[in-house]
Amino acid sequence: MIQAAIGISDDIDIDVAIEEVLGQCQKQLGTSRPQVGILFSSCMEADFSEILGRILREFPKLQLIGCTTDGEISRETGFIEDSLALLLLSSDTLEFATAVATNISTNAEDSLGKAYRDACQTLHKEPACAFIFPDGLTTIGVALDEVFRHVFGDSFPVFGGSSGDHYLFTGCYQFHNDKIYSDAAPILLIAGDVQILSAIRTGPIPTGFHYNLGRHENNIVYEIDGKTAVAFFREHLGEYRQEFSEFPLAVYENNETAFYLRDPLGLNPEDGSISFVGTFPEHCTVRLTLVSQNDVLDAAEQANLSILNKESGIEPELLLIFPCTWVRHILGSKTNNKFALLRQAPGAIPFFGFYCYGEIAPFSIGTPSRFHNDTYVIVALSSRKS
């Protein structure tokens, strides 16, 4: 089985917070020893070197990864910010392996490929899935979709989210064991007989016509439907300004019905271009979207229901949740409503996650993993019953 222990604290004194976190974990662990840990925190001024060191002194053989965020998530707290959140995992049937890819803004494929191979070498079985937390600022213009396909293949499930910096947009941190990085991507591989169920839902609803995406380079779009990107948005949304970035584009590849979203990030009035969070494929169409709080909440509820559906045949032992930071800023005081169903579910299934600058998941298991904006991703893990 998968045994999960979760500790979380938002005490203003970081020294007190880490001791509270470790105490909560120890109480849940009992005599068992964790094999891997995941640390999330939106305390951007914390001494992460000391925090990592304290965790590893408590658990010397622990493999530890994590990142900074725009808010943490747990069953105990729902959404919380300015906190330390630690998930510790152990299993008598599964293996865990971690590694870190560095310099991913300039060398993503080679670096991630090496990290993946390094982690695989420590496993006795083939990995079943991966979780990854790349830098959410340095990778904005990196084609992560292509990198994942080249490194992991078209059917290997990769989940996670881009690290954040509490909405400051000045610099994110990633963790691996006792080291702190920027422009990196820590990864966790899980091997063994594990059942995986995932759901991904978008709150914004595509509307209107499909428009051809014209000239673009990486995450910068110059033309849409024969007009400059700025002119296109002004035509459909009025005077386009930075604060209208909550209206993402839905992106469709190869005439598919499935879509992913791209958030406008900034405009250049000189050439009419708009930068987005994430890149675009060479040939695609885009649609505008409608946004409402009710639709965003409904999307999360649909995802949660699909995970909790008994017809899946999976009884989750752990839920990992990766919603976009955009979601919580749209919902405001309603942010915690997304977790009501999970808290009411029988069995008190532990859940843990963070608000991301971009989400990572396939549309469905067996299809290529993708980089998303403005989505709600939930992953259920369970060790198979013999």
Image (tube, rainbow, N blue to C red):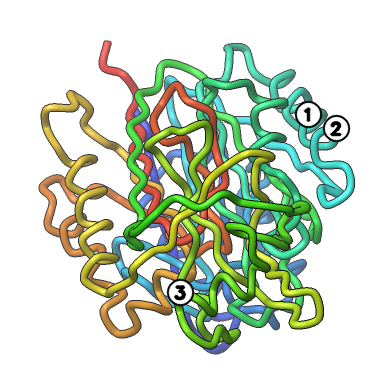
Report if residue 22 is visible in the image: no
Asked if labels 3 and 2 touch by Cβ distance under 8 angstroms, the answer is no
Whether 186 is drawn above or below 230: the answer is above
Asked if labels 2 and 1 touch by Cβ distance under 8 angstroms, the answer is yes
Q: Quadrant of residue 376?
A: bottom left
Along the viewing direction, whichever of 329 and 31 lies nearer the viewer? 329
The single residue placed furthest to the front in the displayed view is 226
Left or right, 309 with respect to 241, comes to left
Distance in Å between CA atoms under marks 3 and 1: 42 Å
Point out the tag, 2 or 3, that comes first from the N-terminus: 2
Figure disc tally:
3
**Residue ID for mark 3:** 236
Look at discs 3 and 1 and give the one toward the viewer: 3
Quarter occupied by the N terminus = top left
What kind of residue is marked 1? Gly
**Residue ID for mark 2:** 110
Q: Position of residue 346 (x, y in %)?
A: 10, 47
| Mark 2 closeness class: few <14, some 14–19, many ≥20 residues within 10 Å | some
Whether 364 is drawn above or below 48: the answer is above
Q: What residue is rendered at 58% in x and 63% in y?
A: 357
Q: Secondary structure at mark 3?
A: helix
Point out the tag, 3 or 1, that comes first from the N-terminus: 1
Left or right, 274 with respect to 246, comes to right
Quarter occupied by the C terminus = top left
Q: Position of residue 119 (x, y in %)?
A: 71, 27
Q: What residue is rendered at 58% in x and 74% in y?
A: 42
Q: In the rendering, which numbered label is found on residue 113?
A: 1
